[in-house]
Image: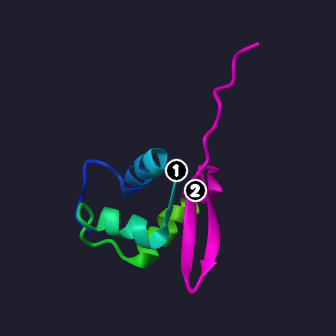
Amino acid sequence: MDWKAMPIRNAIVELLEEKGALSTDELEKKLKDEYEGLTPSVLDKELMKLELNGMVTITSLGRGRKRIEFIRRERETPR
């Protein structure tokens, strides 16, 4: 995969912030143009990192498809 100015993880977050939720197929199609070397395993690793950091939730849709949803957090006000 070529070096890009924006890490793939940031591009995923931007897309999900805009759309709210996408299937892995939709997400992969949108990222393929900019990230030519993107493979399903690379996408899965990035999504796992985002899920572990509490930024997305991943739900199985069956037959290997998943729904990725961005977790919107309300800003906490200082006390």
Up-down relation of residue 66 to residue 34 (above or below)? below
Residue 30 badge: none
Count of numbered tags: 2
On the image, the x and y values in percent for residue 1 come to 27, 69
The residue beneath circle 2 is 69
Spatial CA span between label 2 and label 1 = 6 Å
The residue beneath circle 1 is 20
Which quadrant would the C terminus be assigned to in this image? top right
Say which amino acid is labelled 2.
Answer: Glu
Write the start and end of the magenta stretch as one range: 50-79
Residue 76: within the magenta? yes
Most extreme residue toward the top, as rendered? 79
Say which amino acid is labelled 1.
Answer: Gly
Residue at (63% x, 74% y) in the render: 60
The reply to whether dot 2 and dot 1 touch (C-beta < 8 Å) is yes
On the image, the x and y values in percent for residue 16 come to 47, 51
On the image, the x and y values in percent for residue 33 come to 23, 65
Instruction: Specify whether 3 is left or right of 71.
Output: left
